[in-house]
Image (cartoon, helix red, strand yellow):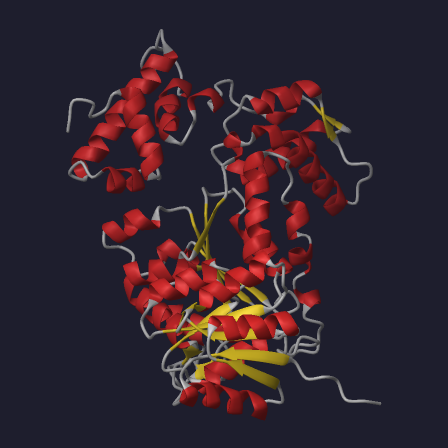
């Protein structure tokens, strides 16, 4: 039986010493290596034969490594690309990842990292079994269904699906932004599912749920005796996700001290467990998520700008449910089917037309998660195969037409308190507008009329803040 053909790699660098170093390192790993000095020489080699991987310096005598990546993309070629950039040039790294590079390395190149990134790009990370003897895919069955669970046909969701498919193939860090309950973890699962890492672990971490004193131990692991109570060695999140994807949910809740440590791990691709003498190389893809406006958090000094720059290479914005209500019927059907499957009921219950129409007039401040909880309760109350309006338990006041974002809730609550409270307003819309106007003005005054910071304190993006200020005439007389 003949030995398998080794992967063929193309190395492009105009510095002979570096080119030779890369070639020797890769030859020792058993790869078939060819080299080139310029963009045109590399393109001639690419046109004459197929390669599994292109490794190119950013700056070349007749162009850049990005020129080669774009030519490969335009030609529909399947070679992955690794770009080597000048040390500290984060802008070049981001540009390379956005141009379709699988990953990047910074000079001076650490050969250990070099070998690890090449192996990862070629899929040489062992993927059959994990340390516990279970198939890797079996640990995360939800990830295989993630793309299917993103129900809906709206243009907003189609944009998210398209972006997920495009970014999944690279190592580029992704920041998923959206309100609570929109399905940010589902997007992260889908990225992992479609990536070359799909057979390796997907580790989800809620950054806001871990006590600050335990963050370093949980993220990086520790050695026996590192502190009181450390009776055995323990891996951290990075080691557990080795070869796979680490999903950092609510990244905006990390304290500044931990943000600094996380930045170093991302830059060095190595972690030092508590009590350990040496660092361990880690090979993970970072996907993070937040409901906060991180740019505003940076401006307010609560989030490191350099970490934000590293995490926000590619941003995926998950739209709130009220902005894609045309998907409501399909989402509700999928949720009801899942509820029935969990309960062992067949066929699944359905929504009465009147119930669906009633739902479509509601603003869903809690997004898809609120819809799921609402349908769980409604199915229990219905006691039959059809969910009616009366089973939903929705308030009579619906906010879909006023682009509900949580501000109106404070105004509506007194109206539900009973006859002992203030009398009902004669013009509800005008009353709610006035309440919202006062809240916006208070927030602006508190933040010295910085619209970004004021909006962030209310859970609004700068775009949403501008829209509301213009609609309500807040600050219209100001410069």
Instruction: Give x and y (percent) for residue 113.
Output: 47, 81
The residue under the point 70% across, 78% down is 133
Q: Is residue 348 above or below residue 29?
A: above
Image x and y of residue 364, in percent = 51, 31
Q: Nearer the viewer, residue 284 or 384?
A: 284
Is residue 212 visible in this depiction of the protein?
no
- Is residue 359 shown left or right of residue 134? left
The x and y percentages for residue 128 are: 70, 76
Q: Is residue 461 left or right of residue 158?
A: left
Query: Relative to residue 91, is residue 23 drawn left or right?
Result: right
Q: Residue at x 57, y 29 (%)?
A: 325
Q: Is residue 305 above or below residue 21?
A: above
Q: Residue at x 41, y 70 (%)?
A: 62
Depth check, front residue: 345 or 268? 268
Residue 210 at x, y percent in the picture? 41, 62
The quadrant in which the N terminus is found is bottom right
The correct choice, above or below, for 305 with respect to 38 in the image is: above
| Whether residue 377 is visible | yes
Residue furthest right as drawn:
1
Report the number of discs: 0
Residue 327 quadrant = top right
């Amino acid at each position: 039986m003949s030995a398998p053909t080794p992967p063929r790699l193309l190395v492009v660098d105009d510095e002979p010493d570096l080119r030779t170093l890369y070639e020797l390192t890769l030859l020792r790993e058993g790869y078939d290596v060819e080299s080139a000095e310029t963009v045109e020489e590399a393109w001639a080699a690419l046109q004459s034969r197929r390669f599994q991987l292109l490794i190119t310096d950013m700056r070349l005598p007749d162009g850049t490594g990005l020129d080669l990546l774009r030519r490969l993309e335009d030609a529909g070629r399947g070679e992955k690309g690794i770009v080597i950039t000048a040390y500290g040039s984060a802008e070049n790294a981001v540009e390379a990842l956005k141009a379709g590079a699988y990953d990047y390395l910074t000079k001076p190149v650490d050969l250990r990292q070099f070998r690890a990134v090449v192996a990862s790009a070629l899929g040489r990370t062992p993927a059959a079994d994990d340390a516990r003897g279970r198939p890797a895919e079996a640990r995360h069955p939800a990830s295989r269904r993630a793309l299917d669970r993103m129900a809906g046909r709206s243009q907003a969701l189609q944009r998210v699906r398209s972006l997920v498919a495009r970014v999944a193939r690279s190592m580029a860090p992704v920041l998923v932004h959206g309100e609570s309950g929109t399905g940010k973890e589902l997007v992260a699962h889908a990225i992992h599912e479609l990536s070359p890492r799909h057979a390796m672990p997907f580790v989800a971490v809620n950054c806001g749920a871990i006590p600050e004193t335990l963050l370093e131990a949980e993220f990086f692991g520790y050695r026996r005796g590192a502190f009181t109570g450390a009776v055995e060695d323990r891996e951290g999140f990075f080691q557990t996700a080795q070869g796979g994807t680490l999903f950092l949910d609510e990244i905006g809740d990390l304290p500044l001290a931990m943000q600094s440590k996380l930045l170093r791990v991302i830059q060095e691709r190595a972690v030092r467990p508590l009590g350990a003498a040496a660092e361990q190389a880690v090979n993970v893809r970072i996907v993070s998520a937040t409901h906060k406006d991180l740019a505003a958090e940076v401006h307010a000094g609560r989030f490191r700008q350099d970490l934000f720059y590293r995490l926000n290479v590619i941003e995926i914005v998950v739209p709130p449910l009220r902005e894609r209500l045309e998907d409501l019927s399909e989402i509700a059907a999928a949720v009801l089917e899942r509820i029935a499957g969990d309960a062992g009921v067949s066929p699944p219950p359905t929504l009465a037309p009147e119930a669906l129409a009633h739902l479509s007039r509601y603003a869903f401040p809690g997004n898809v998660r609120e819809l799921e909880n609402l349908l769980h309760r409604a199915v229990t109350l219905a006691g039959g195969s059809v969910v009616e309006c009366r089973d939903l338990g929705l308030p009579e006041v619906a906010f879909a037409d006023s682009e509900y974002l949580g501000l109106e809730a404070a105004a509506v609550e007194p109206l539900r308190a009973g006859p002992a409270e203030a009398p009902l307003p004669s013009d509800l819309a005008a009353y709610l507008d006035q309440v919202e106007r006062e809240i916006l003005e208070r927030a602006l005054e508190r933040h010295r009329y910085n619209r970004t910071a004021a909006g962030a304190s209310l859970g609004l993006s700068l775009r949403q803040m501008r829209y509301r200020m213009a609609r309500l005439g807040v600050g219209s007389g100001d410069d």
